[in-house]
Amino acid sequence: MKVYNLFLTGFLLITLFMPAFLAEPCIAAFVPSNNITVERDGMAWGYQEQVTGNDSVIFRSFIDMEAGDSDKFVNAWEILKAENILRDQMKESIKTKPDVKLNGTSEFVNLTDIDFLVSEDALGKIGKESLIKNFALVSYTFEKGMDRDTNIWFMGTPNSNVTINLPAGFDVERTEGLNNESKESENNYTVLKGSFGPEKNITLWISENESYKAEMQERERSIEQNTENKTSETINKTEIVEKTGKAVEARKNPEFIKNFYTWFCQKIQKVNLV
């Protein structure tokens, strides 16, 4: 039986733990969507999934049997336990079959965190066919950050919607596997929208915008220059304060007072002689 790689959901766990349920026909399917935010040194992949109809019955039954007490009712603590089970299973799935590659390899892509949430919609009797929403956020870091020319590969659920947010200053040269593609650009940010194709893989070839790169370098130079100028001003002010302080101290010195008094008396004498 084919299991869609990496998707959060019940079907992955149901396939492993509850094959008996799969004999039943599915009245409605899982409806997944993806929101991917790529940065220069990592990325975050957010998933949202809606489970309806007979699939929601199967999913509640999984929670009750594998995370609960099989009393045909899903309560809050069973949902919390199911979240941990699903989080661990998703982690193992990604480690077994990586879903992100940078320049053709997953070697420098590190999975750092998974946050998983089953909504309160799952509460109640397992026989309900009402909507259940699942959410997950998977975080990755890149050991080698994206450079001037990069390709990045994603593996997702076939035909699921996807939004891909690129880092500031990066342009899309071409795409492969992104169906119904649309592109929006604003304030140096590019956003791609579409869906995973039947092959479930999307590859993007992206490059850094040279004008944006030059602008950022000029901004960094300006910041460094301002910092140097402020440092010089601080040093000058310190020197002035130190010199002023020394002059004040000199005036307080008894020898200075004595010399000043002698000079003053000599001036008076000269005036009297005149």
Image (tube, rainbow, N blue to C red):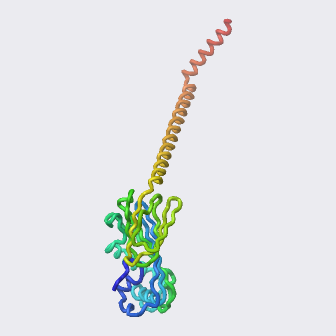
Dividing the picture into quadrants, the one containing residue 92 is: bottom left
Relative to 162, say whether 132 is above or below.
below
**Residue ID at (37%, 89%):** 18
Q: Is residue 2 left or right of residue 77?
A: left
User: Is residue 59 among what the camera can see?
Assistant: yes
Give the percent coordinates (x, y) of residue 182: 49, 70
In the image, 139 versus 179, the foreground residue is 179
Give the percent coordinates (x, y) of residue 10: 41, 83
Relative to 176, say whether 7 is above or below.
below
User: Is residue 117 among what the camera can see?
Assistant: no
Dividing the picture into quadrants, the one containing residue 97 is: bottom left
Relative to 189, say whether 242 is above or below.
above
Give the percent coordinates (x, y) of residue 106: 33, 67
Q: Quadrant of the C terminus?
A: top right
Q: Quadrant of the N terminus?
A: bottom left
**Residue ID at (46%, 91%):** 27
In the image, 196 versus 268, the foreground residue is 196
In the image, 207 versus 9, the foreground residue is 207
Relative to 171, say whether 50 is above or below.
below
Q: Count numbered badges in the picture.
A: 0
Q: Is residue 227 left or right of residue 95?
A: right
**Residue ID at (45%, 92%):** 72
